[in-house]
Image: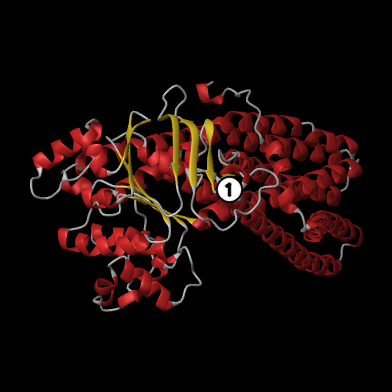
Amino acid sequence: MPRFASPNRERPAVLPMLRRMLPYIHGFHLRLLAAGLATLAAAVLMLAVPMVIRWGLDTLVVSSRPVVLWGPAALIIVIGLAEGVASFASRYLMEAVGFQVVYRLRSDLYRRLHELSFEFHDKARVGDVMSRLTADTEALSRMFGFALPYIAANSLTIVGAAALLLYWDLWLGLSFILVTPLMVRAMRAYAYTVQPSYRRRQASLGRLTEGLRVALNGVREIQLFGQETQEMRKMAARDEEYVGINLEVARISAYWLPHVHFLVSLATAVALAAGGWAVMSGRATLGMLVGFVTTAGLLVRPIRQTGMLTASVVQAAAAGGRVLEVIDERPAVEELPGAKPLPELRGRVELQGIHFAYVPGNPVLKGIDLVIEPGEVVALVGPTGAGKTTLAHLIPRFYDPQEGRVLLDGVDVRTATLSSIRRQVGTAMQNIFLFNGTIRENIAFGKPEATFAAVQEAAQLAQIHDEIVAFPRGYDTPLGERGASLSGGQRQRLALARVLLTDPRLLILDEVSSELDAVTEAKLRSALERAFTGRTTLVIAHRLWTIQRADRIVVLSNGEVVQQGTHDQLMSSGGLYREIYDALTGVLPGRGGDLA
């Protein structure tokens, strides 16, 4: 026996997964009841056909008049039409419920993805998440809309046919039914064996999707560095892995499903031989034999079909497990019970004893104590990896520190609702993301109800308005994927306009001018002067003009505050700030330099 033919003792997680789906069926009980009744009616009507055949043939043998077959023939046609209507109602109602269940499930998954904090998305692979949203939910849709309805109908048909065979002739019925446990065992062994392969197939599909996403997003870099061949090798390896797992699934199916088919053929042959002997011995009529074989034939399709549908259900169980993994994931940053909206901010920020690490044992921030007064402009500077962006991300509660507290106007951010915090704390992040919509839609993303005049005002403040109106379609210009039609500096200023439109009381700017040319940078200086007015501002910048404008400069190194003061104070006191300043102004004389 091949290695893959041995039953894996890992129990297929079909029933636990179905139990988890019960809340998603809430509200569809009447549809399910109607679908169940329609399924039962279809099964009864299907089983009525062999009974009519037996009645017609026995009547023909007794009367020897072929005309007596017209009645049974017409009745079979009527039964067939009625069965078609019942089957249609059963399939349609179950598919309707299935689509609604999967719609609810996908909505919960999508909602959970938005609820999960940065910590989850830092580690998650986008392609794998996309696979769970699409391929995995589609597998569940096929199960609810196709596999389960047919398995239910087939089960009713099998039970009804078996009861009818036993009713007609106990020994003939037993001769057929005794083979059934062997069929069930074969299908059970198939389900046990194929379950792990289906789970690995879904995971492999996630890796393949992720590889495609990365390759498509990085196609310019791939071409720029001439790495097309190398990337093709990587994609081929992922594709080969996926194909290999699919071939393993195919081998398992190819090994076990013929067992079921052979056992069905064996049972039919036994029934035909035993029935023929019963007719010749006078214990059964010809009509009974034909009706018996017809009924046995009705068992062939549902048993074979159920064996094949088992694969869909097992695949859906693996897919459902992957979907539920994400839905069951708890956000690292959650609102506490009883969290209240944050009152309108004046803008005071306090960080008390902050310790933070992305990976346990590898601290990024170590005992940070910092106070920013309302309306103050504070610049964070320091070497790469000093913890500047991490510190800024704790204020709008993108992450929670392992130790310490973040207070806004004296309120611990963990006691406030997330929406009220982020509505008043505007953040222009270093990694800019623009949506595949128009310029106006992107600027108004954080405030969709904003008027066109307000959108234009924010664009003017960010020094991007003149360039927008120069486009043929102005603010209605589509941006394309991730704003690829814009320059880096244009994307930065568009992202800045998006934040300024929300008019936050606390503004966090992370390298908003890193990709601006000297002319645009000069324009942006005056715009930021106005943006800083009347609001607390935390700036993470590499440009000295931004830092020198700050009321206070905080120097971070290795996760600790090592210096604080104005530019003049820090220059006179020496230390890390002076070292970085001297090094950069020496490299770029006359520019004022960048401060890392």
Residue 435 placement: quadrant: bottom left
Query: In terms of depth relative to the viewer, which is nearer, 87 or 507?
Result: 507
Residue 87, horizontal then vertical, whole percent: 73, 61
Residue density around tag 1, few if under 14, some if 14–19, many if 20 or more, within 10 Å: some
Residue 361 placement: quadrant: top left
Quick check: 449 left or right of 153? left
Compared with 174, 301 (above or below) is below
Q: Which residue is mark 1?
A: 112
Query: In terms of depth relative to the viewer, which is nearer, 195 or 588?
Result: 588
- Determine the residue positioned at 82% across, 43% down: 159
Query: In terms of depth relative to the viewer, which is nearer, 277 or 595?
Result: 595
Compared with 162, 72 (above or below) is below
| Kind of residue at disc 1 | Arg
Report the quarter where the N terminus lies.
Answer: top right
Residue 298, horizontal then vertical, whole percent: 74, 49
Compared with 17, 39 (above or below) is below
- Determine the residue positioned at 84% across, 38% down: 173
Q: How is the image coloured?
A: secondary structure
Quick check: 113 left or right of 187? left
Query: In terms of depth relative to the viewer, which is nearer, 123 or 159?
Result: 123
Residue 392 placement: quadrant: top left
Residue 214, horizontal then vertical, whole percent: 33, 45
Is residue 485 among the parts visible in the rendering?
no
Quick check: 231 left or right of 478? left
- Determine the residue positioned at 41% across, 60% down: 499
Compared with 330, 363 (above or below) is above
- In the structure shown, which secondary structural element does the residue marked by tag 1 occupy? helix
Report the quarter where the C terminus lies.
Answer: top left
